Image: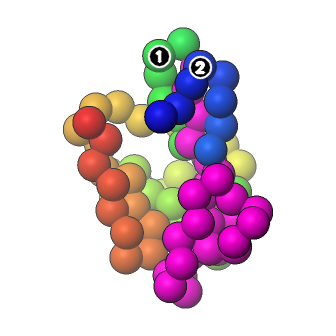
Amino acid sequence: ELSEGQTLSLGRAAGRNDITLTGCQNVSGTHCQISLRGNLFFIKDLNSTNGTYVNSNRVPANEQIKINRGDIVSFANIEFFVS
């Protein structure tokens, strides 16, 4: 569960992320962040090698974009459905 103002990092490197994605060679060591501000969720690509996508659109490196219910967030061979 994500609390207001909290940020979670996702990536392959154990010990450097809040959520570690093991066995995913196409995920960067620290790949992206998800944050909650004012009941809105945002995702930020951390200059990953293979990119972060929302609804098949690449998220620009180091930019936060809002994600909405029904969006599909993907990187490497991983997809998340925002509900």
| Res 2 visible | yes
**Residue at horizontal 33 percent and vertical 62 percent from the top:** 79
Residue furthest out toward the right: 16
Position of 33 relative to 48 (above/below) = above
Tell me the quarter of the picture where residue 74 sits: bottom left
Q: Is residue 20 left or right of residue 30?
A: left
Residue 21 location in percent, x, y? 53, 70
Q: Which of 80 and 19 is in front in this view?
A: 19
**Residue at horizontal 38 percent and vertical 53 percent from the top:** 73
Residue 43 location in percent, x, y? 55, 42
Magenta segment includes 81: no
Q: Nearer the viewer, residue 10 or 52?
A: 10
What type is the residue that disc 1 sits on? Answer: Asn
What type is the residue that disc 2 sits on? Answer: Glu
Secondary structure at badge 1 equals: loop
Q: Is residue 43 left or right of residue 70?
A: right
Q: Is residue 77 left or right of residue 83?
A: right
> Who comes first in sequence, dot 2 or dot 1?
2
Residue 65 location in percent, x, y? 54, 37
Total numbered labels: 2
Position of 41 relative to 75 (above/below) = above
Which range of residues does the magenta coloring cover?
9-37
**Residue at horizontal 31 percent and vertical 41 percent from the top:** 82
Label ID, residue 17: none
**Residue at horizontal 56 percent and vertical 24 percent from the top:** 3
* Residue that carries the numbered disc 1 in the rendered image: 39
Residue 36 location in percent, x, y? 56, 27
Q: Are marks 2 and 1 in contact (CB under 8 Å)?
A: yes
Work out which quarter of the rendered image holds the C terminus and state it: top left
* Residue that carries the numbered disc 2 in the rendered image: 4
